Amino acid sequence: MPLKKRHHDFDWVLIVCAGLLPLVLGILCTAIEARHTVSQQQISTANTLITQAEKMSDNAWNMITEMRQYQYQPCAKIEDQLQRAGTLNPYFRSIGMLKGNDIICSSAFGLRHGTLTEMMMQPPPITGKAWWSISVRGTVGVPNRPAVVFMRQLPDTSGFWAVIDGQYLMDFMNAIGGSRGYHMSLQFSGGAVIASGPADMQPKLYMKSESFQADSSRYPITVNVTVPASELLKAWRQALFIFLPMAAIFSILLMILTANWLRRRISWHDEIGRAIRARQFSVHYQPVYSNTLHACAGVEALLRWQRPNGVMIRPDIFISAAEAEGMIVPLTQHLLELMAEDIQSWQVEPGFHLGLNLAAEHLQHDDFVADIELFAERIKDKQLCITLELTERSLIEEGEKVACKLRHLRAQGMKVAIDDFGTGHCSLTYLLTFPLDYLKIDRGFINAIEGLDVETPVLDAIINLCHKLELDVLGEGVETATQFEYLRQRGVIFIQGYYYARPLDNDRLRAWLSEQGHKPLLVEEHYEPELHHS
Protein backbone atom coordinates (compact mmCIF):
# COMPACT_ATOMS: atom_id res chain seq x y z
CA MET A 1 0.00 0.00 0.00
CA PRO A 2 1.46 3.42 -0.89
CA LEU A 3 2.67 5.46 2.08
CA LYS A 4 0.38 8.38 1.23
CA LYS A 5 -2.69 6.11 1.19
CA ARG A 6 -1.69 4.57 4.52
CA HIS A 7 -1.38 8.06 6.01
CA HIS A 8 -4.79 8.97 4.58
CA ASP A 9 -6.40 5.86 6.04
CA PHE A 10 -4.76 6.46 9.40
CA ASP A 11 -6.03 10.04 9.43
CA TRP A 12 -9.58 8.86 8.84
CA VAL A 13 -9.25 6.30 11.63
CA LEU A 14 -7.99 9.06 13.94
CA ILE A 15 -10.91 11.33 13.03
CA VAL A 16 -13.43 8.52 13.63
CA CYS A 17 -11.80 7.66 16.95
CA ALA A 18 -11.95 11.31 17.97
CA GLY A 19 -15.66 11.34 17.16
CA LEU A 20 -16.33 8.12 19.06
CA LEU A 21 -14.41 9.17 22.16
CA PRO A 22 -17.10 11.48 23.63
CA LEU A 23 -19.78 8.89 22.85
CA VAL A 24 -17.90 6.03 24.49
CA LEU A 25 -17.01 8.13 27.52
CA GLY A 26 -20.60 9.34 27.68
CA ILE A 27 -21.97 5.81 27.65
CA LEU A 28 -19.60 4.77 30.43
CA CYS A 29 -20.25 7.88 32.50
CA THR A 30 -24.04 7.65 32.13
CA ALA A 31 -23.92 3.97 33.11
CA ILE A 32 -21.99 4.92 36.26
CA GLU A 33 -24.36 7.82 36.94
CA ALA A 34 -27.42 5.59 36.42
CA ARG A 35 -26.04 3.03 38.86
CA HIS A 36 -25.34 5.80 41.38
CA THR A 37 -28.85 7.24 40.96
CA VAL A 38 -30.49 3.85 41.46
CA SER A 39 -28.25 3.19 44.48
CA GLN A 40 -29.36 6.46 46.07
CA GLN A 41 -32.99 5.49 45.39
CA GLN A 42 -32.35 2.13 47.06
CA ILE A 43 -30.89 3.77 50.15
CA SER A 44 -33.78 6.21 50.34
CA THR A 45 -36.35 3.42 49.94
CA ALA A 46 -34.66 1.26 52.57
CA ASN A 47 -34.53 4.13 55.03
CA THR A 48 -38.21 4.90 54.41
CA LEU A 49 -39.15 1.26 55.05
CA ILE A 50 -37.09 1.15 58.24
CA THR A 51 -38.73 4.34 59.45
CA GLN A 52 -42.19 2.83 58.89
CA ALA A 53 -41.25 -0.44 60.58
CA GLU A 54 -39.87 1.51 63.57
CA LYS A 55 -43.08 3.54 63.77
CA MET A 56 -45.17 0.36 63.82
CA SER A 57 -42.85 -1.08 66.46
CA ASP A 58 -43.29 2.06 68.56
CA ASN A 59 -47.09 1.59 68.36
CA ALA A 60 -46.78 -2.04 69.44
CA TRP A 61 -44.61 -1.29 72.45
CA ASN A 62 -46.82 1.62 73.44
CA MET A 63 -49.82 -0.70 73.27
CA ILE A 64 -48.07 -3.23 75.52
CA THR A 65 -47.22 -0.46 77.97
CA GLU A 66 -50.87 0.60 78.07
CA MET A 67 -51.98 -2.99 78.75
CA ARG A 68 -49.97 -3.02 81.99
CA GLN A 69 -53.02 -1.42 83.64
CA TYR A 70 -54.92 -4.71 83.17
CA GLN A 71 -52.23 -6.88 84.74
CA TYR A 72 -54.21 -8.06 87.78
CA GLN A 73 -57.71 -8.00 86.26
CA PRO A 74 -59.56 -11.09 85.03
CA CYS A 75 -60.01 -11.57 81.30
CA ALA A 76 -63.80 -11.41 81.54
CA LYS A 77 -63.60 -7.92 82.90
CA ILE A 78 -61.11 -6.53 80.35
CA GLU A 79 -62.13 -8.46 77.24
CA ASP A 80 -64.14 -5.59 75.79
CA GLN A 81 -61.34 -3.08 76.38
CA LEU A 82 -58.83 -5.36 74.67
CA GLN A 83 -61.10 -5.83 71.68
CA ARG A 84 -61.64 -2.07 71.31
CA ALA A 85 -57.88 -1.35 71.63
CA GLY A 86 -56.95 -4.03 69.15
CA THR A 87 -59.64 -2.95 66.69
CA LEU A 88 -59.41 0.82 66.82
CA ASN A 89 -55.61 1.14 66.80
CA PRO A 90 -53.98 0.69 63.39
CA TYR A 91 -51.76 -2.20 62.34
CA PHE A 92 -52.82 -4.72 65.05
CA ARG A 93 -54.06 -8.21 64.36
CA SER A 94 -54.53 -9.01 68.03
CA ILE A 95 -53.29 -8.17 71.52
CA GLY A 96 -53.49 -10.05 74.80
CA MET A 97 -52.13 -11.25 78.14
CA LEU A 98 -49.96 -14.25 78.93
CA LYS A 99 -49.16 -16.45 81.91
CA GLY A 100 -46.06 -18.49 81.32
CA ASN A 101 -46.57 -19.94 77.85
CA ASP A 102 -50.37 -19.86 78.16
CA ILE A 103 -52.52 -17.11 76.68
CA ILE A 104 -55.06 -16.10 79.29
CA CYS A 105 -56.76 -13.36 77.28
CA SER A 106 -56.92 -12.28 73.62
CA SER A 107 -58.64 -9.47 71.76
CA ALA A 108 -59.25 -11.93 68.90
CA PHE A 109 -60.30 -15.09 70.82
CA GLY A 110 -61.52 -13.76 74.14
CA LEU A 111 -61.52 -16.37 76.89
CA ARG A 112 -60.50 -19.29 74.73
CA HIS A 113 -57.17 -20.36 76.06
CA GLY A 114 -54.22 -21.47 73.99
CA THR A 115 -50.47 -21.30 74.12
CA LEU A 116 -48.05 -18.75 72.71
CA THR A 117 -46.45 -21.48 70.64
CA GLU A 118 -49.81 -22.35 69.08
CA MET A 119 -50.61 -18.70 68.41
CA MET A 120 -47.21 -18.07 66.75
CA MET A 121 -47.29 -21.45 64.99
CA GLN A 122 -43.68 -21.89 66.16
CA PRO A 123 -41.79 -21.99 69.45
CA PRO A 124 -40.99 -18.57 70.92
CA PRO A 125 -37.39 -17.51 70.57
CA ILE A 126 -34.99 -17.95 73.47
CA THR A 127 -33.51 -14.47 73.88
CA GLY A 128 -32.96 -14.18 77.63
CA LYS A 129 -34.62 -10.77 77.41
CA ALA A 130 -37.88 -9.52 78.86
CA TRP A 131 -38.62 -7.55 75.68
CA TRP A 132 -38.46 -9.22 72.29
CA SER A 133 -40.04 -9.18 68.84
CA ILE A 134 -39.95 -11.54 65.90
CA SER A 135 -41.52 -11.84 62.47
CA VAL A 136 -43.48 -15.03 61.80
CA ARG A 137 -44.98 -16.68 58.73
CA GLY A 138 -48.49 -16.45 60.19
CA THR A 139 -50.59 -16.81 63.32
CA VAL A 140 -53.20 -19.39 64.25
CA GLY A 141 -56.07 -17.15 63.18
CA VAL A 142 -54.40 -16.01 59.92
CA PRO A 143 -51.91 -18.76 59.06
CA ASN A 144 -51.18 -17.67 55.47
CA ARG A 145 -50.17 -14.05 56.11
CA PRO A 146 -47.02 -12.95 57.94
CA ALA A 147 -47.08 -11.02 61.16
CA VAL A 148 -44.78 -9.53 63.77
CA VAL A 149 -45.08 -10.63 67.40
CA PHE A 150 -44.07 -8.25 70.21
CA MET A 151 -43.64 -9.71 73.70
CA ARG A 152 -43.16 -8.16 77.19
CA GLN A 153 -42.56 -10.76 79.93
CA LEU A 154 -42.73 -9.80 83.61
CA PRO A 155 -40.80 -11.37 86.48
CA ASP A 156 -43.88 -13.19 87.80
CA THR A 157 -44.11 -15.14 84.46
CA SER A 158 -47.04 -13.04 83.30
CA GLY A 159 -46.74 -10.92 80.21
CA PHE A 160 -48.38 -8.99 77.39
CA TRP A 161 -48.20 -9.46 73.68
CA ALA A 162 -49.22 -7.67 70.48
CA VAL A 163 -49.34 -8.92 66.91
CA ILE A 164 -48.97 -6.53 63.98
CA ASP A 165 -50.39 -7.75 60.72
CA GLY A 166 -47.63 -8.10 58.08
CA GLN A 167 -50.08 -7.01 55.41
CA TYR A 168 -49.59 -3.41 56.51
CA LEU A 169 -45.86 -3.71 55.86
CA MET A 170 -46.40 -5.51 52.56
CA ASP A 171 -48.83 -2.81 51.40
CA PHE A 172 -46.37 -0.09 52.41
CA MET A 173 -43.50 -1.83 50.55
CA ASN A 174 -45.66 -2.17 47.47
CA ALA A 175 -46.61 1.53 47.67
CA ILE A 176 -43.02 2.80 47.78
CA GLY A 177 -41.41 0.28 45.43
CA GLY A 178 -44.07 -1.45 43.40
CA SER A 179 -44.04 1.02 40.51
CA ARG A 180 -40.30 0.49 40.10
CA GLY A 181 -40.45 -3.27 40.34
CA TYR A 182 -38.43 -3.36 43.57
CA HIS A 183 -38.25 -6.55 45.58
CA MET A 184 -38.23 -5.63 49.29
CA SER A 185 -38.00 -7.81 52.35
CA LEU A 186 -38.04 -7.17 56.06
CA GLN A 187 -37.17 -9.30 59.10
CA PHE A 188 -37.55 -8.80 62.83
CA SER A 189 -34.85 -10.54 64.88
CA GLY A 190 -33.97 -12.82 61.98
CA GLY A 191 -37.44 -14.31 61.87
CA ALA A 192 -39.67 -15.01 58.89
CA VAL A 193 -39.20 -12.80 55.83
CA ILE A 194 -41.95 -10.34 55.05
CA ALA A 195 -41.52 -9.57 51.34
CA SER A 196 -43.13 -7.68 48.49
CA GLY A 197 -42.36 -7.47 44.79
CA PRO A 198 -41.04 -9.92 42.18
CA ALA A 199 -38.41 -12.30 43.56
CA ASP A 200 -37.03 -13.63 40.24
CA MET A 201 -35.15 -10.82 38.48
CA GLN A 202 -33.43 -11.58 35.17
CA PRO A 203 -30.36 -9.59 34.03
CA LYS A 204 -30.72 -7.28 31.02
CA LEU A 205 -27.97 -6.02 28.73
CA TYR A 206 -25.25 -7.29 31.06
CA MET A 207 -26.90 -5.44 33.96
CA LYS A 208 -27.69 -7.50 37.04
CA SER A 209 -30.09 -6.68 39.82
CA GLU A 210 -28.55 -4.74 42.70
CA SER A 211 -29.36 -5.44 46.38
CA PHE A 212 -28.97 -3.14 49.36
CA GLN A 213 -29.34 -4.12 53.00
CA ALA A 214 -29.86 -1.77 55.94
CA ASP A 215 -30.43 -2.25 59.67
CA SER A 216 -32.43 -0.22 62.15
CA SER A 217 -30.45 1.56 64.84
CA ARG A 218 -33.35 1.22 67.31
CA TYR A 219 -34.85 -2.24 66.80
CA PRO A 220 -33.65 -5.62 65.49
CA ILE A 221 -35.03 -4.88 62.04
CA THR A 222 -33.24 -5.77 58.81
CA VAL A 223 -34.38 -4.46 55.44
CA ASN A 224 -33.28 -5.58 51.99
CA VAL A 225 -34.14 -3.67 48.79
CA THR A 226 -33.35 -5.26 45.42
CA VAL A 227 -33.54 -3.19 42.25
CA PRO A 228 -34.28 -5.07 39.02
CA ALA A 229 -31.95 -4.78 36.03
CA SER A 230 -34.83 -3.16 34.13
CA GLU A 231 -34.78 -0.22 36.56
CA LEU A 232 -31.03 0.21 36.04
CA LEU A 233 -31.57 0.11 32.29
CA LYS A 234 -34.39 2.65 32.56
CA ALA A 235 -32.20 5.06 34.56
CA TRP A 236 -29.40 4.57 32.03
CA ARG A 237 -31.72 5.36 29.14
CA GLN A 238 -32.90 8.53 30.86
CA ALA A 239 -29.30 9.66 31.43
CA LEU A 240 -28.42 8.86 27.82
CA PHE A 241 -31.42 10.81 26.57
CA ILE A 242 -30.08 13.89 28.38
CA PHE A 243 -26.42 13.34 27.54
CA LEU A 244 -26.45 12.08 23.95
CA PRO A 245 -27.31 15.41 22.27
CA MET A 246 -24.40 17.07 24.08
CA ALA A 247 -22.14 14.12 23.32
CA ALA A 248 -23.06 14.34 19.64
CA ILE A 249 -22.15 18.05 19.61
CA PHE A 250 -18.83 17.38 21.37
CA SER A 251 -18.18 14.50 18.99
CA ILE A 252 -18.71 16.68 15.91
CA LEU A 253 -16.57 19.48 17.35
CA LEU A 254 -13.77 17.08 18.23
CA MET A 255 -13.87 15.54 14.76
CA ILE A 256 -13.69 19.01 13.19
CA LEU A 257 -10.77 20.01 15.44
CA THR A 258 -8.97 16.74 14.70
CA ALA A 259 -9.54 17.12 10.96
CA ASN A 260 -8.26 20.72 11.07
CA TRP A 261 -5.20 19.64 13.03
CA LEU A 262 -4.51 16.84 10.58
CA ARG A 263 -5.06 19.24 7.68
CA ARG A 264 -2.52 21.64 9.14
CA ARG A 265 -0.12 18.80 9.77
CA ILE A 266 -0.58 17.42 6.28
CA SER A 267 -0.32 20.91 4.88
CA TRP A 268 3.08 21.48 6.50
CA HIS A 269 4.34 18.13 5.29
CA ASP A 270 3.08 18.65 1.76
CA GLU A 271 3.93 22.34 1.66
CA ILE A 272 7.55 21.78 2.63
CA GLY A 273 7.77 19.07 -0.01
CA ARG A 274 6.29 21.40 -2.65
CA ALA A 275 8.60 24.21 -1.56
CA ILE A 276 11.61 21.93 -2.01
CA ARG A 277 10.49 20.94 -5.50
CA ALA A 278 9.73 24.58 -6.41
CA ARG A 279 13.11 25.73 -5.03
CA GLN A 280 11.53 28.26 -2.70
CA PHE A 281 14.32 27.68 -0.18
CA SER A 282 17.61 29.52 -0.35
CA VAL A 283 20.74 29.73 1.77
CA HIS A 284 22.05 32.79 3.56
CA TYR A 285 25.54 32.83 4.99
CA GLN A 286 26.65 34.75 8.09
CA PRO A 287 30.40 35.55 8.15
CA VAL A 288 32.53 34.53 11.12
CA TYR A 289 35.46 36.73 12.22
CA SER A 290 38.76 35.30 13.49
CA ASN A 291 40.69 37.23 16.12
CA THR A 292 43.74 35.25 15.05
CA LEU A 293 43.53 35.96 11.31
CA HIS A 294 41.95 39.41 11.81
CA ALA A 295 39.73 38.57 8.86
CA CYS A 296 36.73 36.49 7.89
CA ALA A 297 37.51 32.86 8.68
CA GLY A 298 34.31 31.26 7.44
CA VAL A 299 30.54 31.37 7.32
CA GLU A 300 27.55 29.62 8.86
CA ALA A 301 24.86 28.40 6.45
CA LEU A 302 21.30 29.46 7.34
CA LEU A 303 18.29 28.14 5.45
CA ARG A 304 15.59 30.64 4.42
CA TRP A 305 12.12 30.11 2.93
CA GLN A 306 10.36 32.73 0.85
CA ARG A 307 7.01 31.87 -0.67
CA PRO A 308 6.10 33.01 -4.19
CA ASN A 309 3.98 35.84 -2.73
CA GLY A 310 7.09 37.24 -1.06
CA VAL A 311 6.18 36.17 2.49
CA MET A 312 9.14 34.91 4.52
CA ILE A 313 8.54 31.92 6.80
CA ARG A 314 10.55 32.15 10.00
CA PRO A 315 13.20 29.42 10.34
CA ASP A 316 12.07 28.42 13.82
CA ILE A 317 8.58 27.74 12.41
CA PHE A 318 9.40 25.69 9.33
CA ILE A 319 12.32 23.82 10.94
CA SER A 320 10.12 22.80 13.91
CA ALA A 321 7.38 21.77 11.47
CA ALA A 322 9.87 19.78 9.40
CA GLU A 323 11.10 17.96 12.52
CA ALA A 324 7.54 17.22 13.65
CA GLU A 325 6.40 16.00 10.22
CA GLY A 326 9.42 13.86 9.37
CA MET A 327 10.68 16.28 6.70
CA ILE A 328 13.91 17.44 8.33
CA VAL A 329 16.07 14.87 6.52
CA PRO A 330 14.79 15.77 3.00
CA LEU A 331 15.08 19.46 3.97
CA THR A 332 18.70 19.05 5.09
CA GLN A 333 19.52 17.11 1.93
CA HIS A 334 18.02 19.96 -0.09
CA LEU A 335 20.12 22.43 1.92
CA LEU A 336 23.27 20.50 1.00
CA GLU A 337 22.30 20.64 -2.69
CA LEU A 338 21.72 24.40 -2.56
CA MET A 339 25.01 24.97 -0.75
CA ALA A 340 26.93 22.85 -3.24
CA GLU A 341 25.53 24.97 -6.08
CA ASP A 342 26.38 28.26 -4.32
CA ILE A 343 29.91 27.24 -3.36
CA GLN A 344 30.88 26.59 -6.97
CA SER A 345 31.04 30.38 -7.46
CA TRP A 346 33.12 31.14 -4.35
CA GLN A 347 36.68 32.41 -4.45
CA VAL A 348 38.05 31.71 -0.96
CA GLU A 349 41.32 30.57 0.58
CA PRO A 350 41.83 26.88 1.39
CA GLY A 351 40.67 26.07 4.91
CA PHE A 352 37.78 28.57 4.79
CA HIS A 353 35.24 27.35 7.38
CA LEU A 354 31.72 26.34 6.44
CA GLY A 355 29.35 25.73 9.36
CA LEU A 356 26.33 23.49 8.84
CA ASN A 357 23.55 22.90 11.40
CA LEU A 358 22.42 19.30 11.73
CA ALA A 359 19.21 17.93 13.26
CA ALA A 360 19.26 14.94 15.60
CA GLU A 361 16.99 12.97 13.25
CA HIS A 362 19.44 13.40 10.37
CA LEU A 363 22.42 12.48 12.54
CA GLN A 364 20.67 9.24 13.47
CA HIS A 365 19.54 8.55 9.89
CA ASP A 366 21.20 5.75 7.92
CA ASP A 367 21.98 8.12 5.02
CA PHE A 368 23.71 10.78 7.15
CA VAL A 369 27.32 9.83 6.45
CA ALA A 370 26.63 9.27 2.75
CA ASP A 371 24.88 12.66 2.48
CA ILE A 372 27.80 14.53 4.06
CA GLU A 373 30.42 12.64 2.05
CA LEU A 374 28.56 13.35 -1.20
CA PHE A 375 28.39 17.04 -0.32
CA ALA A 376 32.10 17.11 0.55
CA GLU A 377 32.92 15.41 -2.73
CA ARG A 378 31.00 18.02 -4.73
CA ILE A 379 32.92 20.94 -3.16
CA LYS A 380 36.30 19.30 -2.59
CA ASP A 381 38.01 21.54 -5.15
CA LYS A 382 37.30 24.56 -2.91
CA GLN A 383 39.22 22.90 -0.02
CA LEU A 384 36.77 24.14 2.58
CA CYS A 385 36.82 23.09 6.24
CA ILE A 386 33.34 21.70 6.87
CA THR A 387 32.11 22.14 10.44
CA LEU A 388 29.19 19.94 11.51
CA GLU A 389 27.22 21.77 14.20
CA LEU A 390 25.17 19.75 16.69
CA THR A 391 22.36 21.67 18.35
CA GLU A 392 21.35 21.04 21.96
CA ARG A 393 17.73 21.92 21.25
CA SER A 394 17.05 18.36 20.07
CA LEU A 395 18.13 15.25 21.96
CA ILE A 396 20.45 12.80 20.21
CA GLU A 397 19.38 9.41 21.53
CA GLU A 398 21.82 7.11 19.67
CA GLY A 399 24.83 8.79 21.24
CA GLU A 400 27.54 6.18 20.67
CA LYS A 401 26.34 5.35 17.17
CA VAL A 402 26.34 9.04 16.19
CA ALA A 403 29.78 9.49 17.80
CA CYS A 404 31.16 6.74 15.53
CA LYS A 405 29.76 8.54 12.49
CA LEU A 406 31.33 11.84 13.58
CA ARG A 407 34.70 10.21 14.22
CA HIS A 408 34.55 8.76 10.71
CA LEU A 409 33.87 12.19 9.20
CA ARG A 410 36.52 13.89 11.36
CA ALA A 411 39.03 11.44 9.96
CA GLN A 412 38.25 12.99 6.55
CA GLY A 413 39.19 16.47 7.81
CA MET A 414 35.79 17.75 8.99
CA LYS A 415 35.22 19.52 12.30
CA VAL A 416 32.49 19.07 14.90
CA ALA A 417 30.95 21.83 17.01
CA ILE A 418 28.16 22.20 19.58
CA ASP A 419 25.79 25.00 18.61
CA ASP A 420 23.88 27.09 21.20
CA PHE A 421 26.01 25.63 23.99
CA GLY A 422 24.46 25.97 27.45
CA THR A 423 20.82 26.29 26.38
CA GLY A 424 19.94 22.57 26.19
CA HIS A 425 19.63 19.78 28.72
CA CYS A 426 22.61 17.70 27.62
CA SER A 427 25.64 20.04 27.47
CA LEU A 428 28.02 17.96 29.57
CA THR A 429 26.71 14.73 28.08
CA TYR A 430 27.60 15.99 24.60
CA LEU A 431 31.09 16.97 25.79
CA LEU A 432 31.65 13.45 27.09
CA THR A 433 30.03 11.59 24.19
CA PHE A 434 31.06 13.29 20.95
CA PRO A 435 34.43 14.18 19.44
CA LEU A 436 34.44 18.00 19.38
CA ASP A 437 36.54 20.83 17.98
CA TYR A 438 34.44 23.93 18.75
CA LEU A 439 31.88 25.27 21.15
CA LYS A 440 29.48 27.98 20.01
CA ILE A 441 28.29 30.05 22.97
CA ASP A 442 24.62 31.00 22.72
CA ARG A 443 23.73 34.68 22.30
CA GLY A 444 21.86 34.62 25.61
CA PHE A 445 25.18 34.47 27.49
CA ILE A 446 26.71 37.15 25.24
CA ASN A 447 23.80 39.50 25.97
CA ALA A 448 24.66 39.26 29.68
CA ILE A 449 27.88 41.24 29.10
CA GLU A 450 27.38 44.70 30.66
CA GLY A 451 30.92 46.09 30.57
CA LEU A 452 34.57 45.20 30.25
CA ASP A 453 35.09 45.48 34.01
CA VAL A 454 31.89 43.65 35.00
CA GLU A 455 32.29 39.91 35.36
CA THR A 456 29.87 37.50 33.75
CA PRO A 457 30.44 34.33 35.85
CA VAL A 458 28.55 31.79 33.74
CA LEU A 459 30.03 33.02 30.46
CA ASP A 460 33.52 33.10 31.97
CA ALA A 461 33.07 29.56 33.29
CA ILE A 462 32.07 28.30 29.82
CA ILE A 463 35.08 30.02 28.21
CA ASN A 464 37.45 28.61 30.84
CA LEU A 465 35.95 25.13 30.36
CA CYS A 466 36.62 25.35 26.62
CA HIS A 467 40.23 26.41 27.19
CA LYS A 468 40.80 23.51 29.58
CA LEU A 469 39.29 21.07 27.08
CA GLU A 470 41.40 22.67 24.31
CA LEU A 471 38.32 23.54 22.30
CA ASP A 472 38.06 26.64 20.13
CA VAL A 473 35.27 29.02 21.10
CA LEU A 474 32.85 30.97 18.93
CA GLY A 475 30.66 33.71 20.38
CA GLU A 476 27.26 34.02 18.68
CA GLY A 477 25.05 37.09 18.53
CA VAL A 478 27.80 39.66 19.17
CA GLU A 479 26.21 43.06 18.58
CA THR A 480 28.31 45.67 20.37
CA ALA A 481 31.93 46.72 20.63
CA THR A 482 31.85 45.97 24.37
CA GLN A 483 30.77 42.38 23.76
CA PHE A 484 33.41 41.95 21.07
CA GLU A 485 36.21 43.34 23.25
CA TYR A 486 35.10 41.35 26.32
CA LEU A 487 35.28 38.09 24.34
CA ARG A 488 38.57 38.99 22.68
CA GLN A 489 40.21 39.73 26.03
CA ARG A 490 39.20 36.27 27.28
CA GLY A 491 40.68 34.42 24.35
CA VAL A 492 37.54 33.81 22.28
CA ILE A 493 38.91 33.37 18.76
CA PHE A 494 35.79 33.39 16.61
CA ILE A 495 33.10 36.08 16.59
CA GLN A 496 29.73 35.91 14.84
CA GLY A 497 26.94 38.46 14.94
CA TYR A 498 25.59 41.73 13.64
CA TYR A 499 28.60 43.59 15.00
CA TYR A 500 30.64 41.97 12.27
CA ALA A 501 28.18 41.04 9.50
CA ARG A 502 24.61 40.08 8.86
CA PRO A 503 23.48 36.92 7.03
CA LEU A 504 23.87 37.44 3.28
CA ASP A 505 22.55 35.63 0.25
CA ASN A 506 25.10 34.06 -2.08
CA ASP A 507 25.53 37.02 -4.45
CA ARG A 508 25.90 39.55 -1.63
CA LEU A 509 28.26 37.22 0.23
CA ARG A 510 30.66 37.02 -2.71
CA ALA A 511 30.66 40.79 -3.00
CA TRP A 512 31.16 41.22 0.74
CA LEU A 513 34.03 38.74 0.83
CA SER A 514 35.72 40.57 -2.00
CA GLU A 515 35.36 43.98 -0.32
CA GLN A 516 35.35 43.25 3.45
CA GLY A 517 36.47 39.69 3.99
CA HIS A 518 40.20 40.44 4.36
CA LYS A 519 39.84 43.57 6.49
CA PRO A 520 40.41 43.49 10.26
CA LEU A 521 37.49 44.37 12.49
CA LEU A 522 38.04 47.78 14.12
CA VAL A 523 35.97 48.78 17.11
CA GLU A 524 35.15 52.22 15.76
CA GLU A 525 33.77 50.77 12.53
CA HIS A 526 30.85 48.87 14.10
CA TYR A 527 27.24 49.76 13.41
CA GLU A 528 24.29 49.71 15.74
CA PRO A 529 22.41 46.39 15.67
CA GLU A 530 18.81 46.06 14.62
CA LEU A 531 16.26 44.68 17.04
CA HIS A 532 15.75 41.41 15.18
CA HIS A 533 18.18 38.50 15.00
CA SER A 534 19.29 36.11 12.33
Image: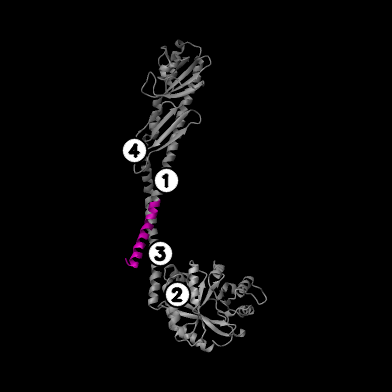
Residue 10 image point, x, y percent:
36, 62
The tag on residue 202 is: 4
- Disc 2, disc 1: CB below 8 Å? no
Q: Are marks 4 and 1 in contact (CB under 8 Å)?
A: no
Q: Residue at x 56, y 69 (%)?
A: 432
Q: Secondary structure at mark 4?
A: loop
For residue 8, what is the image quadrant?
A: bottom left
Q: Is residue 87 left or right of residue 413?
A: left
* Residue bounds of the magenta highlight: 1-25
Estimate the spatial distance between the alpha carbons at disc 3 and disc 4, rounded to whole Å.
48 Å
Can you name the residue that lies furthest to the bottom here? 515
Q: CA distance from mark 2 to mark 1?
A: 60 Å
Residue 6 vs residue 341: left or right?
Answer: left
Front position in the image: 189 or 245: 189
Kindly check if marks 2 and 3 are in contact, taking CB atoms under 8 A apart as contact: no
> x, y percentage for residue 71?
50, 14
Disc with the residue nearer the chain's start (2 vs 3) = 3
Specify whether 446 is left or right of 74: right
**Visible residue check, residue 361:** yes
Instruction: Bin the neighbour count of mark 1 within 10 Å (Cα to Cα): few under 14, some 14-19, many 20 and up.
Output: some
Q: Disc number at residue 261?
A: 3
Q: Amino acid at mark 2?
A: Val
What distance separates the C-alpha of mark 2 from that of mark 3?
35 Å
Mark nearer the N terminus (4 vs 2)? 4
Question: Of tags 4 and 2, which is closer to the observer?
Answer: 2
The structure's colour scheme is one colour
Q: Nearer the viewer, mark 3 or mark 4?
A: 4
Query: Which residue in the structure is indicated by mark 2?
Result: 369
Amino acid under disc 4: Gln
Identify residue for label 1: 33
